[in-house]
């Protein structure tokens, strides 16, 4: 299936996403540090990045911007426990394909990942 990178400053959130998406056959790599996640993106072979908006050193929007500088083809889903219209607009403007609100709903995550990987989302 797909190689998916998950960046969330809370390791339990990444572990939850890993459990959900590995059952769908995806290869999941989880990170809690922005620099490590970006280094992995630079190596190539990542199909989708799932980014939390609230991180340790950078915002998820800043990481999104960096990812798109490295590889515009990587699809991105933004995660947040604090949804605002401003962050949603900024994410879309910078190339995010979808937006998920925490707490993570298993079915919603599975559907959004499948849609984004199939080219369906609010921005392609």
Image (tube, grey):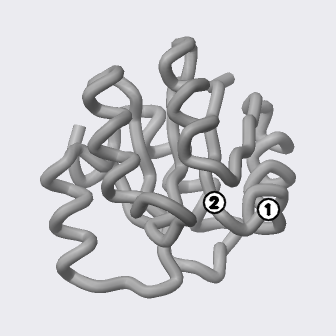
Query: How far across and down, in percent of the image, does residue 26 sit?
Result: 73, 32
Q: Which mark is residue 61?
A: none
Q: Considering the numbered disc 1 on the image, is that residue within a helix, a strand or a loop? A: helix
Q: Considering the numbered disc 2 on the image, is that residue within a helix, a strand or a loop? A: loop
Image vertical order of residue 61 relative to residue 116, above or below? below
**Number of marks in the image?**
2
**Residue on which disc 1 sits:** 11
**Residue on which disc 2 sits:** 8
Query: How far across and down, in percent of the image, does residue 13 sit?
Result: 74, 66
Residue pictured at 25% horizontal, 59% vertical: 91
- Tell me whether circle 1 and circle 2 mark residues in contact (CB < 8 Å): yes
Mark 2 is surrounded, within 10 Å at the Cα level, by few (under 14), some (14 to 19) or many (20 or more) other residues, namely many
Q: Quadrant of the N terminus?
A: top right
Marks 1 and 2, Cα distance to the nearest angstrom? Answer: 7 Å
Q: Quadrant of the C terminus?
A: top left
Query: How far across and down, in percent of the image, does residue 10 sit?
Result: 73, 68
The residue nearer to you, when weighing 65 against 50, is 65
């Amino acid at each position: 299936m797909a190689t998916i990178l998950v960046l969330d400053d809370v390791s339990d959130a990444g572990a939850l996403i890993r459990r959900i998406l590995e059952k769908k056959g995806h290869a999941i790599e989880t990170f809690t540090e922005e620099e490590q996640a970006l280094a992995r993106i630079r190596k190539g072979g990542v199909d989708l990045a799932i980014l939390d908006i609230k991180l340790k050193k950078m915002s998820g929007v800043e990481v999104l911007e960096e990812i798109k500088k490295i590889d515009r083809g990587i699809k991105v889903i933004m995660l947040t426990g604090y949804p605002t219209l401003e962050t949603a607009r900024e994410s879309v403007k910078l190339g995010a394909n979808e937006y998920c609100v925490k707490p993570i709903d298993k079915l919603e995550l599975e559907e959004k990942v499948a849609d984004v990987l199939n080219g369906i989302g609010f921005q392609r």
